[in-house]
Image (cartoon, helix red, strand yellow):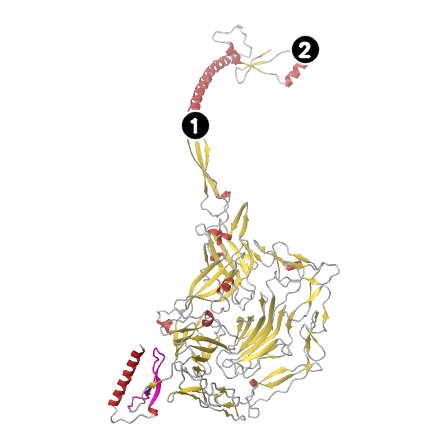
Amino acid sequence: MRSSSWFVVRCALILCTLRLIGGAEGQQRCSEMDYYFEYTECDSTGSRWRVAIPQSSRACTGLPEPVRGTECTFSCKAGEFLEMSAQECTPCAAGSYSLGSGIRFDQWDTMPAGFSSLATSLENSPHSNLRASCNSSSWVPQGNYLESNRDECTVSLIYAVHLKKQGSVSFEYQYPDNNLLFEFFIQNDQCQEMDQSADTKWLKLTNHGEWETHTVSLKSGTNILYWRTGGVLMGTKVVKPVLLKNVQIEGVAYTSECFPCKPGTFSRAPGSSTCEPCPRDTHSGHGASSCTPCNTTTQYAAEGSAVCKARPPCSKKDYFQIHTACDHEGKTQVIYKWIEPKICLEDVSGAQTLPPSGAREPCPPCNPGFYNNDTATCSPCPPGTYSDGMKACQPCPAGTEPTLGYEYKWWNVIPSNMKTSCFNVGNSKCDSMNGWEVAGDHIQSGSGSSDNDYLILNIHIPGFKLPTSVSSHSVTEFGRITFEFETLCTADCELYFMMDVNRKSTTVVESWEKTKTRQTYTHIMTKNASVSYTWAFQRTNQPSDVRLYINDVARIYSITVSNAVDGVSSSCRVCALSTQPSSSACVPCPPGHYIDTLTSKCIECPRNNYLIPHATPGSDACKVCGPASRSDKDHRYCYSDCHFTHTEGNITLTFDFSLLGSVGSLMNGPSFTSKGTKYFHLFNISLCGQGQMAVCTDNVTDLSVSESQREKGDGPTAVKTFICQSTIIPASGRGFHTALSSQSINLADTFLGATVNDNLEGIRARPELYPKMSKKVPDVNFYYRSLETTSSCESGRSAVVTLRCNPDMSAKGELSVPSQCPAGTCDGCTFHFFWESSGACPTCTERDYHQIEGVCKGRHQDVVYVWTEPKLCMGGVTLPEKKTLLCEGMEFWVRLGAGMGAFTAVLLCSLTFYFWKKNKRLEYKYSRLVMSANRECEMPVADSCAVMEGENEGDMEDEVVYTKPSLLRKLKAIASKGNGDNYENVQLNLSQSKALVWS
């Protein structure tokens, strides 16, 4: 293989030489200016040839013969280059530098050769108007750095390099805004992405104004480098772009020339590997070996300047006021100082002079926790003592302990645990160190070197220490920071409040744009860790090297940090005392206990009460949980056990929502931005909060934790709560391998209660958003609130989850948001969710079914039980088993009915005949009475006592009615015995009007 390769190369070289000789007659010989040397590609043995390449198409003769070159892995040391004529390493001349086997790009006035910027729409939309909207998006050179796009288009900065050996690429970047995605990846010449870990592909966020260095190893061969940015969601806020500078690539086989120093830098000695920036008030051009001084009388130049600038007349923008430190008499005064470095002229026409110093005034008092030790300075109180800043330090009374923390409200000097600095966008540090300046009753942003400088104020808290009587197992708040501020701006200024937990990554907690009136903001620390809080103020987001908005300012009036482990004490608080009679030492309370103000003992909160963090001692520290909620065993928070009971009239409905599952998820959308970016909102809801909580995380910027930690919500940017939201951008059309999750926020961390009412603690459900067809089973509303306040939601966010019974759905059901509010909220603060499921139906009871009796067959009858339709219940009681009962058949009842009918018919016939006969007799008797009644009023004489023909005794019995004497008549009869009047009356039933009586 080696011999055949050599033969082919040799034949090609001979052929080229013969062709050149054949056409060389009449042509001049080539000089060193007519050609340059290059190496051929390396063969399989690692060898190559040096050949001469003509500079132009003009023919000449006598090109040097190809000679064997150096080994493919050969390279020179830093500060040297490979001189191709002699194939030897030669030191770089003064005014230039070399990396040896590397190349560096540190000048960005224009896009360097080999770099290209490619923009694509996020969805690769076929619509031409969407594609055209990204044509203007690109990486823009800004002199000392490259600036990325600020929109949602995907923009890639591409550079291809061929390495002869393994090497690396390193670059510096600023990535302050997670509204942009920023990734760096590498492809080979087959457009296949190299294997990279997540922490080398996705760049970590940086502090505002600070530069981070990122280094990635490269393999030999072709490496195509991609720096890719793309917007997540473009809201109303201005997005901070990604900045890139000082790209350095190692592993190039050789460097055939040295790089000249860029303007503003120089290299004094030959063989330099770097160029140094020119000192202040000097400048240099391209490839300078030294810097030229400016005429400081009329000119000035910042460090690393390419030209000198004329000094302008001094104005009000060139000086600032400060309060001097307190002197031994306790006096201070306002003085004015020129902004350093001073670049203006005082002794020219129209120049402003420095105002005279103000009158000496009494110094402000010390901050709480400090005292004046008669040395014109404030010192912290010794441990165990406290002071309000006005008086000397005093020990805490018995039964109390000092509160730890910081409360800064007087600003005569910058406190010892606070630092101020200034970062320029293009450089690491500002020329001016005036980051923030004290001003008596407030501290305010300084001048800076230019309007787009970041003015930094930082306070570091090494940890938090809870009061002795407070158990760390029963609190969700370890400390809090509260500050009062305002901003006064004429440009697009912005104030950032950030935090860095355990020095891992800095996250923006909140930010405020343009002018904001004086207001207070509070952030709660939910875990005990070392944290740095930072305020960064920027007057404008646009590139600037001048001061046009020097009067735009941010002021902070007070900063309060509670429970700081290294804090001072401004007051004392009641603590729980030991049970020992002679002891007055403070003791910790068990979880869920409060301090009784009368006995100074620990008392457990009542059942279903939770302990309010940082509440004053007393029973008011315990607050009852809301309806249908209960507290955990440590009384830290309230939650629902997924059971709910509702009584209306004499009907009680019992619900078991555990069938809905531990966590529900909803991805609504898709939604589109103005440029066609497709995104979704993912909501995770832990309805009851018992056991598993909802977790939302950022899979782009949260790279310091493992995947398992991210799922558990242990990452610094993870949100673990009742309800949270993430913004999801699908991988399709983006060039990403996985969907991106970003901007995770907490929507609800406190459960307020569950009820069928439409209002709870000022949060209103909106039943009109979900029209209801049936009112047999009421909707149940779960109410939540977030304790985190935002600039648009001063009372924090809130959420309402409405559960509706639908027996036609599965137990998990369907989770949705109102169609009128597709983002889940109509006002940005209150979120509404609708969960329709069979698992939201009440538990079945005996009243939800009825029995059906079957026909009687063979003296047996079946009784079955069925659900009452529509069935609006789940679980609970089950239908009873089918029953079989004894019964009488239909034939028996038919026979019985026929017999009874026949008997009744015979009886009726007999009675009819009897009454007919009797009626005949009565007619005869009636006629006899009528005949006798027609005679005169005399008693008829009986012709005979015998019974007439046709009459019988029975007839006479029917005609005579015996009247039984009443009690009154019997008494009269007894009274009349003496007169011999003893008789009995018998009435003859002859007619209705007359009677025959005898005695």
Is residue 95 placed above or below 409 in the rendered structure?
A: below
Residue 784: x %, y % from top left: 54, 59
Which corner quadrant of the image does residue 153 belong to? bottom left
- Magenta segment includes 769: no
Foreground mark, 1 or 2, reads 1
- CA gap between label 1 and label 2 equals 70 Å
Residue drawn where x is 58% and y is 16% of the image = 963
* Viewer-nearest residue: 228 or 325: 228
**Amino acid marked by disc 1:** Trp
**Dot 2: what SS?**
helix
Which residue, given by chain and number where applicable, does mark 2 sit on?
Answer: 979
Is residue 32 placed above or below 852 in the rendered structure?
A: below
* Viewer-nearest residue: 234 or 822: 234
* Mark 1 neighbour class, 10 Å CA radius: few under 14, some 14 to 19, many 20 or more: few
Residue 990: x %, y % from top left: 52, 15
Q: In what quadrant of the picture does the C terminus appear?
A: top right
Residue drawn where x is 75% and y is 60% of the image = 582
Residue 440: tell me if it is visible: yes
Q: In what quadrant of the picture does the N terminus appear?
A: bottom left
Image position of 398 (left or right of 607): right
Is residue 782 placed above or below 445 in the rendered structure?
A: above
Any mark on residue 893, and which? Answer: 1
Question: Outermost residue, right direction?
Answer: 582
**Dot 1: what SS?**
helix
- Magenta segment includes 56: yes
- Which portion, as a residue range, is magenta? 35-59
Which corner quadrant of the image does residue 616 belong to? bottom right
Residue 160: x %, y % from top left: 39, 78
